[in-house]
Structures are given as structure tokens and as C-alpha cells.
Image (spheres, helix red, strand yellow):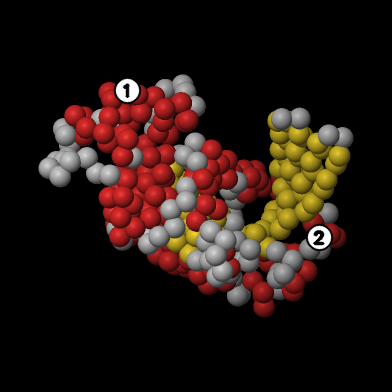
Amino acid sequence: MEAFARERRDWLLKYISLSNGTPSHHTFNRVFQLLEPDALLEVLKNDGAEFIRNLEGLHINFDGKKIKGYSPKSKGNTGLFVVTAWINEHKLCLGQQKVNTKSNEKTAIPKLLESIDIKGSTITIGLSETQKDIAKKIIDKEADYILALKKNQKTLFEEVDDELIWSKVVAEDIDTTCDNQHGRIETRVCKKLPAEDLLEEYFSSKWANLKTSIRIEYKRVENNITTCNTRYYISSKEATAHYFNLNIRGHWGIENQLHWHLDMTFEEDKNRCRTGHAQVNLNSMRKIALNKIKRSDEKLSLKKKKFKASLNKDYLEELVFA
């Protein structure tokens, strides 16, 4: 940052005053340490809201990422974990919430849900444990949910894991997709049933507006090795099997389109800032920059767009003020 400010001093003077000279890296460090994270989080949220004014019908993924570079080998340091709201259709960050450890992810998500307007959207969450209060919060915010069931929810999982009932699903409630990429063939068979066909009222009444149970059978063939598994989901939405198959698959777009770029394009895991609010603020800055770069229609990789912006002032202005 210091090197860029020195090389682009004349350009920066068009927009900001540098009466005390070009900031040193120590100054940048102190500013990011002391700046309250909510300030940049508001910028991130407003940037997404300005670009997409209506979330009706959109798919929002909630998922967390551990910032590896934050954790030194000192005793008691649990690192930094950030949960992000990601609009799948637009590949855009809408907001984020800092948590201390991954076990607290389920407490951070209600805070993040409270901070953004999700009305009319469908929410998927990469949680280790589906939570009833999170489902209720989503419904209270006038959105829908698709939540994964895990085997640690033993009683509920056993209720939906009924081979006999699933074997009777009719063809119109089944959707099959097949991907062949990078030498890997993946087949996903999605079946859906009304929740009342699988769950007793005792269970369904505990989940806000629960309407549909979903089963997805995965088969992967890679290097002549075949692996199969079955996953279950519950949803407040009544939709086609194709809709559920598409959105459950789409949830993992946050890994490829956000987390991967934070690490590879912005080298987040190599950053060693650990003091104060520096790392969470830099995480917000990277997401704001990623949002800007993704809006460019130029046929370049994101890494090349970032590099071009560092060389070309006109292109940089085009990205920043788009």
C-alpha cells in the first residue's frame, strides 16, 4: 500500500489530501488496527445494496472462512473466522460477521441475518449443525431456507432417512444432473417430498414453516474410483426438484468464487496482520475490491484485472467508480 501510494501520489491527490505526505506502512497498519470494523462492513453492505436493490428470488449463501494467516503459534490464539453472505447469481458479497471460532458460526449467522434485508430470497447455510432459531429468523425476515441435516441430529435424521418412502417418489419429483470436469464425473439425483409425508407433526412443528424434505444422492467417479453418498435437507419452500438441486449445488459457489479468490487472487492466507482490527478490516477491503473487479466485463481473469488496475490509472478509475 505504501509503495502504491508513493508511485501514484499525483493520481491520489485528485481525490484526497496528503498534507502530511505519503503514509508509511506503519500508518496504514495503525489505521487498519484502530478502525472499527462496522465502518467498512457498512461500506461492503451498501456496495452490494447499491448494485442489487431487490433480492426477491435470489439465492444467498451463508458460509464461513478461517483466515489462516491470522493465527500465530501462540498459546490460546483461536484465529479469525468470518461468515459471509454471498449472492450466488451475481457473485457478490452482501455482508459479513466476525466470529472467534468456527463453533460460534451458528451464533454469528443470526447477527448477520439481522443486519441485511433478505426479503424474498432463499438462504442456504454451510453450518455444522442446522438450528431451529436460525430457520425462524429467516422466516421472520420474510425469506425461505434450505438447510442441511446432519447425522448428529440423530432423531430428525432417522425420520427422513426412510428408503421405502423415498423409493416411491414419482418421476416429476426427481431431477438428475451430471457434470464432467477435470477428469471427474459427478451425478446428483435430487428427490423431494412434502415434509408431512416423512416427518411426524412433532418434528415438523418445531421448524418454522417447514414444507419440503429433500434427498440428494451423489455419485462421483474419479481416477476409476467411485464414491457415493446421500444427503438430506429441509426447506420452507415448495419448489421443483430441479430448483432444489440447482440451489444446493450452487451453495458451494461461495467456495470457488469467493474463498478461492481471497486466497489465490488476493493472497489472504499469506497476510500476517494480527493486531487489533487489522485483519478483519483488510478482509472487508478485499471483498469490496473483489466486488468491483467482478463487475468489469473485460475478458480477463480476476488476477489479471487486478494487475492491470495497478498499471493503468484509467482502468483503475473505471473499476473504482463503476
Q: Which mark is residue 288?
A: none
**Residue of label 1:** 312
The image quadrant where one finds the C terminus is top left
318 on left or right of 100? left
Q: Nearer the viewer, residue 273 or 211?
A: 273
Q: Position of residue 160 (x, y in %)?
A: 75, 64
Q: 71 or 310, which is in the foreground?
A: 71
Give the x, y percent position of residue 101.
54, 66
Is residue 166 something one can see in this rendering?
yes
| Position above or below: 211 against 31 | below
Residue 286 location (% of width, % of height): 41, 44
User: Within 10 angstroms of label 2, few (less than 14), some, or many (20 or more) residues?
Assistant: few
Which comes sooner in the sequence, label 2 or label 1? 2
At horizontal 71% and vertical 34% (from top left) the residue drawn is 179
Q: Is residue 280 left or right of residue 223?
A: left
- What amino acid type is highlighted by mark number 2? Ile
Residue 209 visible in the shown view: no
**What residue sits right under mark 2 in the picture?**
165
Horizontal arrangement in the rendering, residue 162 relative to residue 313 (left or right): right
What residue is at 47 percent from the left and 47 percent from the top?
271
Query: Which circle, 2 or 1, is nearer the viewer?
Result: 1
